[in-house]
Amino acid sequence: MTAVRPPEADLVVADTAVQPSAPPVPPAATAVRPRARPRPAAPRRILMKGNEAMAEAAIRAGCDAYFGYPITPQAELLEWMARRMPEEGRAFVQAESELGAINMAYGAAAAGARVLVSSSSPGISLMAEAMSYMAGAEVPVVLINVMRGGPGLGSIGPSQADYFQAVKGHGHGDYRTPVLAPSSINEAVELVADAFELAERYRTPVMILVDGILGQAMEPVSASFRMPERRGAEWVLGGADGRPPRVVKSLHLKPEALEQHNLDLQAKFGRIEAREVRWAGERLDDADLVIVAYGTSARVARTAVARAREAGLAVGLFRPITLWPFPTAALADLAARVRGFLVVELSAGQMVEDVRLAVSGRRPVTFRGRMGGMVPTPGEVVDAIRELDGLAAGGSR
Amino acid sequence: MERSVIFAGFGGQGILFAGKVLARAAMDEGLEVFWIPSYGPEMRGGTASSTVIIGDGPIGSPIVDQADAAVVLNPPSHAKYASHVAPGGLLVVNETLVLEPTGRTDITELRIPCTRLARDAGDDSLVSVVALGALVGRLRLVRVESARQAIRDTVGMKRPQVLAADLAAFASGYRVGSRTHGPSPDQEIVRTRVHHRVGVPR
């Protein structure tokens, strides 16, 4: 018998979900002091590993089928599903490979199942072909990438070097997929339910992009697990008894037909860009220097912002939550009133290109990153902010 | 404000467990907490570590450049992490295995025979629980009752038969930690007293 205890069912919403264009939330600055016992009405919190919390969030979101293949630092997600999905009477398949897993997901989603697939960077590369097919065939699947160092087999350390892969397209062809990047385990729980909702609303694969630290770390989970409403899907392949047959495919041999299909897809991507941008700001109101970072990098940046503020620098944090659609307009607005931007990533510099496009040369955009499983310290980021401060001062004279 | 603790030692010394207990105790006090293990290709007998960050607001960096405290249970961990303690911070050292002194004068070094006290409590493997007791006794990162409850909640669920030994190991560490002040000139006396008082709850 399994010894796994599913988290309590009575979790309620505690932390405020970050809304699009949320107002800056300055972190509290008082000393750590153990408080009295939580009030009786206080929400129940459970200490959970990121991988396990995302897996349980998918189950609570009504995930019907999970397909995967083990890989560090994502393995606990698959292990949690292996134990819990059979308990719920749902499908868990450890496939023979990542290719098998993602193509099983393609089939199950075409048949109307709510489907989750997860892996880590090298495994995601193997799934790239099917991502293109699913985007072309407009099949909703949620894919979680717990990123590790690359290229190649790389290392199992945390990384954000798959930004290009996730945001600029995994496979071939003109397509985009929404990419959600939580920076806490609570937020990851919320975004899993949101990802299923987005996937079904727009008939598209959706990727959740986290790094190995968020997969491996534990934090108190207070967010409510949520089951998105199921939409009646008139395209699903469920047997053609009593109705005309349907086809789900990415093949359109006539150029005219394929161009029209592409125009329809582009119109859909335009709707997603118009409606689904999300980001969060911290201490931006009076900031004149801005760190742009997502995921774990944003956590490092938060500490760096606090230290830089103590040193008298007016620094804020801009944290994209959707990496596609990217919060281009919000960054462009910021560029009109701040002196410069520092982008921090666990990579050689990938998101920085999108920040530069948004800022359009109006302000300096500098970069600080570490690679291969290394994570910058807050001290390194503060040093980079000081350099930006000097550069921005020079440029404005 | 945030405070951070690094636990490090051999795999099997309960490094991840001690961090989880501290994290759970802090969570139950309504604080924010972040627990991160080393998840590299560690092997049995190699080094393992976990970091716990406790704060009263959203936790920032998961990477700690200067920890408020470190617990080092074997010589390789001592070599690696003694320098990670911030000036004025606390280093809890398992002196049963770590024979060399740290040589730093800007931190408080609490040398405790963790392995021997764990054996006295009934289980050699409880070495990290002894160290956790000393840490809580000294720094009061969480209340002692919160830590004891976290041990009950964490251990009791899986291994109720060893819960008494865990609580005894925690108590013996706690006594040393809460009674030792400064770099412990009278440690021999403290150690002897603890040794007599703990007994072996079999």
Image (cartoon, coloured by chain):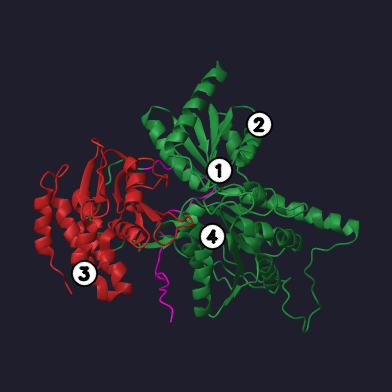
Chain colours: A green, B red
Q: Where does the magenta region start and end?
A: A1-27
Considering depth in this image, is A200 or A294 the residue closer to the camera? A294
Which numbered disc covers residue A197?
Answer: none
> Disc 2 designates what residue?
A360
Do pointers 1 and 3 mark residues of a single chain?
Answer: no
- Residue A44 image-quadrant placement: bottom left
**Precedes in sequence: disc 1 or disc 2:** 2
Q: Furthest-bottom residue in view?
A: A241
* Chain to which the residue tagged by mark 2 belongs: A
SS for callout 2: loop
Which numbered disc covers residue A371?
Answer: 1
Residue A373 vs A102, above or below: the answer is above
2 or 4: mark nearer the eye: 4
Residue A270: x, y in percent? 71, 49
> Disc 3 designates what residue?
B122
> Disc 4 designates what residue?
A72
Q: Is residue A291 left or right of residue A277?
A: left
Point 69% across, 66% down: residue: A99
Point 21% across, 47% down: residue: B110
4 or 3: mark nearer the eye: 3
The amino acid type, in three-letter code, at marker 1 is Met
* Chain to which the residue tagged by mark 1 belongs: A
1 or 3: mark nearer the eye: 3
**Cα–Cα gap, marks 1 and 3:** 45 Å
The amino acid type, in three-letter code, at marker 4 is Thr
**Precedes in sequence: disc 4 or disc 1:** 4
**Cα–Cα gap, marks 2 and 4:** 38 Å
Considering depth in this image, is A159 or B7 the residue closer to the camera? B7
Q: Residues within 10 Å of mark 4 (few under 14, many from 20)?
A: many
Point 9% across, 63% down: residue: B197
